[in-house]
Amino acid sequence: MGYKNGKDILPPNLLKQLQDYIQGEIIYVPKKDQTRAGWGENNGTRQSIQKRNHEIFRLYQNGYSVTELIGKFHLSEDSIRKIIVKTRGLAARP
């Protein structure tokens, strides 16, 4: 993202209008129709974490203890428990 001087790129009437709202400060102008990808969607991170979380839940359902899951996935007890509760809730949806 580069810095542009408004007087170099904007029509004079638009520049004057903008100056009624903001003067001498930097303003961000977003792209048109910008549809941003969600976190981890472009590089596959979100999908790999979902896959890991389903594996944690599957192992838990098959008798693994929370302590065993902590050692296997190197996550905190709190994280393992949150994953189990959240995934159980997702599995219960119709």
Image (cartoon, grey):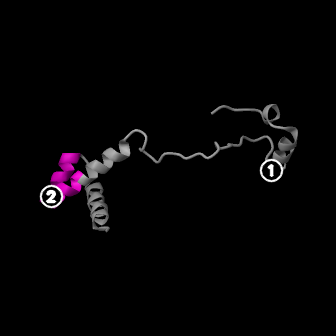
Range covered by the magenta-colored residues: 55-73
Residue 66: in magenta span: yes
Asked whether, in this view, residue 33 is left or right of residue 63, the answer is: right
- Where residue 62 sits, quadrant-wise, is bottom left
Which residue is the site of mark 2? 65
- The mark tally for this picture is 2
Secondary-structure class at tag 1: loop
Residue at x 42%, y 44% (from the top left corner): 41
Q: Position of residue 66 (x, y in %)?
A: 19, 57
Q: Are marks 1 and 2 in contact (CB under 8 Å)?
A: no
Q: Is residue 88 above or below residue 3?
A: below
Asked whether, in this view, residue 89 is left or right of residue 37, the answer is: left
**Foreground residue among 2 and 91:** 91
Q: Position of residue 48 (x, y in %)?
A: 31, 44
Which residue is the site of mark 1? 21
Query: Marks 1/2: CA distance?
Result: 59 Å
Question: Which quarter of the image is occupied by the C terminus?
Answer: bottom left
- Where residue 6 sits, quadrant-wise, is top right
Look at label 2 and name its amino acid: Ser
